[in-house]
Amino acid sequence: MSKKYTYFFGNRAAEGAADMKNLLGGKGANLAEMTNLGIPVPPGFTISTEACAYFYENGRAHPPGLWDEVLENLKKVEAAMGSRFGDPGNPLLLSVRSGARVSMPGMMDTVLNLGLNDSTLQGLAKRAGNERFAFDSYRRFINMFGDVVLGMKHSDFEEILHGKKKALGVKLDTDLEVEALKELVAAYKEKVRAAIGQDFPTDPLEQLKMAIDAVFASWNTPRAVTYRKIHGIPHNWGTAVNVQAMVFGNLGETSATGVAFTRDPGTGDKRFFGEFLINAQGEDVVAGIRTPMAISELKQKMPGLYKELEKIYRSLETHYRDMQDIEFTIQEGRLFMLQTRSGKRTAAAAVRIAVEMVKEGLISRETALLRIEPEQLDQLLHPTVDPKAKVTVLAKGLPASPGAAVGKVVFTAEEAERQAVKGEKVVLVREETSPEDIGGMNAAQGILTARGGMTSHAAVVARGMGKCCVAGVGDIRIDEKKKQFNVKGVTVKEGNFITLNGSTGEVLDGKVNLVQPELGQNFATLMEWADAVRTLKVRTNADTPHDAQVARDFGAEGIGLCRTEHMFFEGNRIEAVREMIVAGDTAGRRAALAKILPMQKGDFKEIFRVMKDLPVTIRLLDPPLHEFLPHTDREIEDLSKQMGVSAEALRNKVSSLREFNPMLGHRGCRLGISFPEIYEMQAQAIFEAACELAAVGFSIVPEVMIPLVGHVNELSIIKEQVIQVADRVMKDKGVKIKYLIGTMIELPRACLTADQIARDAEFFSFGTNDLTQTVFGLSRDDAGTFLPYYVDQRILPDDPFVVIDRQGVGALMSIAVEKGRRTRPDLKLGICGEHGGEPSSVEFCHLLGLEYVSCSPFRVPIARLAAAQAALKQSGKEAIPERDV
Amino acid sequence: MSKKYTYFFGNRAAEGAADMKNLLGGKGANLAEMTNLGIPVPPGFTISTEACAYFYENGRAHPPGLWDEVLENLKKVEAAMGSRFGDPGNPLLLSVRSGARVSMPGMMDTVLNLGLNDSTLQGLAKRAGNERFAFDSYRRFINMFGDVVLGMKHSDFEEILHGKKKALGVKLDTDLEVEALKELVAAYKEKVRAAIGQDFPTDPLEQLKMAIDAVFASWNTPRAVTYRKIHGIPHNWGTAVNVQAMVFGNLGETSATGVAFTRDPGTGDKRFFGEFLINAQGEDVVAGIRTPMAISELKQKMPGLYKELEKIYRSLETHYRDMQDIEFTIQEGRLFMLQTRSGKRTAAAAVRIAVEMVKEGLISRETALLRIEPEQLDQLLHPTVDPKAKVTVLAKGLPASPGAAVGKVVFTAEEAERQAVKGEKVVLVREETSPEDIGGMNAAQGILTARGGMTSHAAVVARGMGKCCVAGVGDIRIDEKKKQFNVKGVTVKEGNFITLNGSTGEVLDGKVNLVQPELGQNFATLMEWADAVRTLKVRTNADTPHDAQVARDFGAEGIGLCRTEHMFFEGNRIEAVREMIVAGDTAGRRAALAKILPMQKGDFKEIFRVMKDLPVTIRLLDPPLHEFLPHTDREIEDLSKQMGVSAEALRNKVSSLREFNPMLGHRGCRLGISFPEIYEMQAQAIFEAACELAAVGFSIVPEVMIPLVGHVNELSIIKEQVIQVADRVMKDKGVKIKYLIGTMIELPRACLTADQIARDAEFFSFGTNDLTQTVFGLSRDDAGTFLPYYVDQRILPDDPFVVIDRQGVGALMSIAVEKGRRTRPDLKLGICGEHGGEPSSVEFCHLLGLEYVSCSPFRVPIARLAAAQAALKQSGKEAIPERDV
C-alpha cells in the first residue's frame, strides 16, 4: 500500500488530531481536533507536510497516488456538504490554505472560492439570490488565483479596477453595480490571457491541482525563506495544504454568521457575549454596514441552532480550559464552526477569568498564573485611553511609559510647573529631556519627546514616576520659539490639548476620554498565588521616599537601585553641586560638598524609614559632571551671574567637560577615583543616616553600590575609602551597623573579570541598560534612527533595551554569575537595569539564578507575576499554555 | 644542625648563585653570581627570604641562630676588607638593602654607612683625609636611619637642615662648612632623642640588628602591599636582606670611581666606553661638578687596575652574552665592581650589537632577535629629536605618532596647505582633527591636538602617514580667533616655531635639531632572520596607493584594512558625498553615489596595482554620516549656497544626524542596512576594479569587510547584497574572480555570537580599537581626562588602547576565535586595530593563533620582529633574556 498523504475531517470525525502538528501543520491538526470534538466544521482534508517535502525532493513532482487521494477525499467533502465541486446547479466551492508546523503569519498563500467558473457562478448566484455577490466573488477569485497561482501581480488587477471606478465616477468597490462587475470579470480574464498566454483555467479540478502546487511553492518564496532564517525554522519542514469546503452565511434567511466570546472579554463576566447577522457574510459583521444583533437574540430567531451553539461553546471552553473567541456560519440552517481560539481580553477580564476558572475547578492556580501576560497588568495600574473613544492619531512614537495622559501642550519644564500650580493639566513636549526638567516632568500629566528611546532619560524617569511617556516621535518638529510643533502638516500650538497613549506610543489630537484603573480582590488573589510560587525576589528602583512607598504598596521587597544623582537636582542643591563642579581644587569641592551632605543624609533617612528593615542599595554618583551644568550661552550667563564667576570661566569649564561620547566618558567610579571627596561625602551621608536610625531602633543594612567598575582595582580603591568613612562615622556615632559594598556589573569587562571583581564585591547588580549599550555598541539615545527598523524587519528579534538579549548580553551575565560565584559562593546577585520589570528578562534572571530583580515601582506587580511564571515553567509543573489554536 | 639563613659572598667565592633568587632575592643572587665569576665585589652576606617569612610567621621574631650567623659572616667581611665593624681607627661601614625575588623598585628601604658613630666617624675622616665628608656622611646616616629604622619622618630632618641653611644664608647643601655639619649632627641627634625618647643608637651591632628588622618590616608597608596586590606578587614571599661592605673611591689618589659600557651604547661600536674620576665618589661622575676622564686614560693612570678592569668587563660580556653597563670603585688600589647590568643603548646600537654578536658566535640568531625591543625600531624609521639638543619643554601630551617635527605653528588645515605650498614647514595645532583636516595634516610636518587620545582621529591618521603627532595636550588653550595658544602662561602665536617629539609626547619651544633615520645592512639582516622564524603574517592598514607602497617597502604582506571613507574626503568627492547625505530619497542618493563610483573605483585600482597579488581587505563605509557635514553656522551657510539648498534645510539635516554618542550610533553596517545603495556602490567599485585588472593579468582576491556587525542577520542581509553586485559585475565584465566576504569583529556581541556570524563570514578581522572602547565602556576620545592617571597609578597596567587588555578584550577575542573556528574551521583570522603594531599585542595575536596582524605602514618592521619574538618565545627555543642583573 502506498503511503498516506491526505487526512480527511468532516461529519464530526477526523483522521488527524491536535497532536499531529508535525504532519498536518498547526491549522490542519486543529481543524481535525475540533471535528473530533463533535463540533461541526466545514469538511475538508489536509495534505501532509510529507507531501510538500516529497515535492521539493523530487523536482516538484507529487508523490505517487496523491491525486487519487485528493479525488477520493473530495468526494467525501461533497457528500458531507451535499453539493458537488463544479456542479453548475449547486456548486461546492473550496478554500486552499497553507499551514506549517509553526505559524508563519502572512508568509504563505491562500486561495478562496476555488471552483468558480462561468457556469458554477450561476449556481452560486442562484443559491445566494444575489447575482452581484456571485460576480464580485468571481472577480476576487480571478484576482487571487492570478496573483497566487499564476504568478501575476495584484496590481495588474487593481489597475483595471481603478480604471473602471474612475470611468464610472465611483469611489468604493461596493458602489460597483453588477454590470460593471461583469465587465471587470471579462477584463480580468483578458488580462490573464495576455499575461500567461492562455485562458484562465475553468476546470475546477485543474484549478485545485494548480492551487495545491502554488501553496507548496509558496513555502519557498524569498520572504518565507528569509522569515524562516530569522526565526530558525528548518527549511525541510515544508507546509501542509488544507482544502476545505467554503460555507456561506448569506444564502437567505436561514443563513447567518457571527462572532462570539465564551465570557465577556471586557470584564471577564461569565456570560455568552457576541454578535451575529442573518443572511450575511463574516466580514459584514465587522464592516459595520449593517448593525449586528446581540448573540442573545439568536435564541429567539433560531432557538435550535442557538441551543446547539451554546452546547458547542461550552464544550470548547471546557476542552481548551480557556475563554474562547469563536466564529460561526449558519448555511441554510446548518451550523458550522469556522474558528475557535483563545480570546483576547482586557487585563481586568484576564485576571477575573483566571481566578474564577480556578474557583470553578477548570484550571489549577499554576495555569491561572501562566495564563496572564504579565505585561498586561500594566493596564490595571495606569489610566488608559477609553477603547471606545474615537481618536485622531497625529503621530506614533515609542510606548516609553504606559498609561495615558490628557493635557495642554507646553514646551518648557518651567511652563509646565507654572501651569500645574494654576491647576492646569499639561503635557510636556520636549526635543529630549534632561535632569533639569525633573520638576516639569513631575508637574505634567505626561511627557512627549521627539528624540530618545525606550531607556532615554524621559522614559526612565517617567516610568519611575509611573507617568505616561511617548518618546522618540521622529515625525514631530518642535519650534520652541514659536511655541508650537508640526507633525505631518498639522500645527499644534502651546495650550492646545493632546492625548498621549503611553501603551501604544500614539499621540492623539485633542482631549480623549480616559478610563481610570481599579485593582480588585481578584488581582490581590492572583498576586498572592504568584508570591507563593516565585523564588526570585522583586525590588524596586526608587530615588525618593514617595517612589519607595508606591513600590512597597505594590509589593517591592527592597530597593535595588537608589540613584543618588536625582537628588542632586532638587531645590537649591543644584547650586551647591555646580559650585562643587566649578571649584578649582579639592578644598573648594569639599566646601561645596559639605553643603550637600545634610540634604543627602536627609534623603537617605527618609528612604530608610519608608523601607523599614528591607534592604536598600544606594548607587554612588554615576553621570558625567557636565550633566549638572547648563549648555546654552544664555543659561551659562545667567548662572555665571548667580554664582559670581565670569561667564568665560564657566564656559571654559562647560567646554572642558564636554565629551564626544558621554556614555563612555568620565563618569561612574571614574569620578570617584578622580574626585574621592564626592564619594566620601555620599558614603558619609549614607552611614550617618543609617547610624542615626539605628540609634532609634531601626536595623538598616545599607548596600553601597559602586557604578561602572571595569577593573577590580577601581573597586578596591573606592571600597577602601568607603570602609574608612564607615569606620569613622560608626566611631563618631558610637553605633555599629552591618553594611555591604558591591558593584554594578554594567561593562563587558566587568563580566569577563567577575572572578577578580568578586574578591572585593559583596554583591553584583547587573546594570543591563549600559551593558546592552556596550555589548551591542549601541547608544540607547541614538538608536531611534535605525533600531525600530531592525526590530520591525526582525533583524533583531526584540528591542534589546526592552527584552534582554540572551545570546549576547545574557551570555556575559552568565559568565559573570559563574565567575563571581566561583570566587565568592555567597555573592548576592541582582539586576537593576530596566529589564528587571520585563517578563522575558525576569524569566532569564530566574534561570540565571539571581536573587532578585529590581524595577520601577509600577512594574513591581508585573515582575512578581513574571517571576512566578518563570518558576513554574522551570519546574515543568505546567506546560506553557498555547495561545492560538 | 639548625637551618641556614645567611649566605656569604666575598673573596671571589660565594655560597649563593644566580639560580637561588627565590631564597636570596634578585640582588643577593646576582651579587653571589658575580663573586663566583671571580669578579671582585665588596664582600657581604645575604639573609634569606626564609628568615623574613619566619619573622612574619613568628610575631616578628628572628629564627633561632640567625644572629650568630650574622656575627660569623660579619667576621668574614671584616677579614676580606681588612677593617673592622666599629673600629674607631679603620672602621668597616655597611650597607643594608632589601632584595625580593622580583624587583619592586622604590618600594622597600635601604640604609647606607651603617656603623658610623662619634668614634668611627674619626676613622672615616682620617682615611678620607676629609673631615667634612665624614660629618656629611654621618648627618645623612642619622637622617636615613631615623627615617627607615626609627619610624621618623624625613621632613623632621629636612626642617633642621633648611633652618641651618637659612640661618647661614647658604643655598646648597655643599655650601655648608664642616662646623655647620657638626652642629647639624648634634641637632639631628637631639631630634631623635625627642622623637623616640632615647639616644640615637651608637652601638654598630645594635644599628645592624635594628636595620635588618627594619628591612624585614618594609616588606609590609602599605605601599609595598598595594604594589604587590596590583602586580600579583604573593605576600608570603618576603624579602632577603643584603648586608655589604661600603667601599669608597675618595680615600686619596689611589682611589677612583667610574662607569663604563662594554660597547659604545650610541653606535654599537665594539670598544670599551666610559668615564672615571680619581679620588671621587660615584655620584661625582654623574653630578658634573668635576669633568670625568675618558676610560682610556685609566690605562695611563693605573695600568694594572685598567688591565684587571679590561679582563673583568670582557668576562662579564661573555658571561652575560650582552653589552654591559658597569660601575666600579677603586679603594686604595683595590678594584671593586659595584654593579653590572645589561646596558641601555640606542636602536642603532641595539641592532648592530645583536647582529655582530651573532657573527662573533656569542649569541644565536634567536637570542639576537629576542634581544631587541621591537618598539625601539621606531627610532630607526623616523627623524628624532637630537638627544644632545638643549630643549625647553612647553607641555606634554600623548606620544601619539612617533618621530619628531619642527615647524611654524598654524591653526587651520587650510593655512597648513597654504604655507606648505610656499615651502614653509608647519606644525598643525588643532583642538582636535576631523576628516576634513586630512589635506592640512598631510601638508604639515607634525600635528598637535589639545584633545583626543592614542587612537583619536589625529593619532590614527598621523601614524598611517608616518607623521609625528602629539595628542591630548590638555594644558594647551587654543584661541583660534587670536591665532595663538597659551600653555602655562606662555603664548605661542601663529608663525612661531615649535618642535614636537612624537616619541615622548613633548612639545618643545623653538626649532630643535633633528636626527634623520638611517636603515643599514644590520637592520636588513635582522629583519631577514625575523621573517625566517615568524609564523604570523604582517599586513598594513593603508587607504592610499602611497601608504600601500610605503608599507610594501617595509615588508607588508597585504592590506588588512583599507578604510574607504578616507577616500570620501579627497578633492571634489566630498561634494557628491554631501549631496548623497542631504538627498531626501533613494533616487537622490543613487544619483549622488553614481558620481562617486568612478572615483572610488579608480582608488581601488591603484591600490590593487601597488599590492599586486597580495590580499587587500576593504572595509565598507564605517563612520556616521554627520562626520561628512559641517557643523558651525558659517560653514553650514557656505555649504548651503554651494549646494543650492536652504541653510535651514541643511541645518535641519545636520541636526537630525546629530548623535549623543556617535561611537555607538548610526554607523558601520547599520548604514548599509538603512541605505543599501551606499554599500552597493562601494561593492560595485571594488568588483569593477578587480575585474578590469583581472582582464589585464592581475589576480586580485578582494576581501570585502562589513564593519560593526553585532548580529549575524546584519551580515547575512549585506552579504546577500554584495554577492548580487559581484555576480552582476562579473557577468557584465565577462570575468570571474575569487573574493571573500567577512566582517570586523569589534563589538562584544560579535565575539559572543561568533559561531553564528561565522556561518556567513569567510574571515574575521578584530577591530580592537572599538572592541576596547566597548569592553571598557571607554571613549578613546574622552579618556584623556582620567586614563593617564589610571595608567600612572597602575589602576590599569597599561593604556588598553596601546596594549591589548588580555583579560577583558583578549578574553572576548579568544571566545570569538574558538566559536568562529568551531563553525568554520578554515576561517581566516586577523586583527586590524591599532594594536596590530604593538609588540605585546602582536604576541597575544600569535598565541591566539591568528593568521595575520595589520598595522600602520611605519609599524610593519616592528610587527615583523614582534611576531618573530612571539614565535621564539612560544617554541621555548630560547629563554626570555633577562634585562636587569
Image (cartoon, coloured by chain):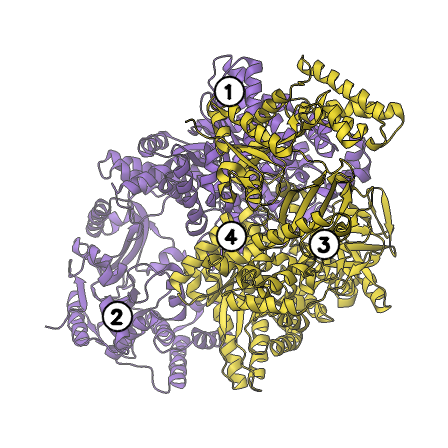
Chain colours: A yellow, B purple
Host chain of mark 4: B
Q: Mark 2 points at which residue?
A: B53
Within 10 Å of the Cα at label 4, are there few (<14), some (14-19), or many (20+) other Cα atoms?
Answer: many
Q: Distance between the residues labelled 3 and 1?
A: 77 Å
Q: What residue type is labelled 3?
A: Phe
Residue at mark 2 shares a chain with residue at mark 3: no
Q: Please state, as top left, top right, bottom left or bottom right, where the N terminus of chain B lies in the image.
A: bottom left
Residue of label 4: B776
- Residue that badge 1 annotates: B609
- Label 1 is placed on what type of residue? Arg
The residue at the point 37 percent across, 76 percent down is B146
- Kindly report the distance in space between the C-alpha atoms of the residues bearing marks 1 and 4: 40 Å
Residue A515 seen from this side: yes
| Circle number at residue A273 | 3
Secondary structure type for disc 4: helix
Q: Quadrant of residue A177?
A: top right
| Residue placed most toward the observer, B590 or B841 | B590
Q: In this view, does B381 lie above or below A693?
A: above
Above or below residue B500? Residue A542 is below
Q: Give coordinates of residue B179: x percent, y percent.
A: 40, 76
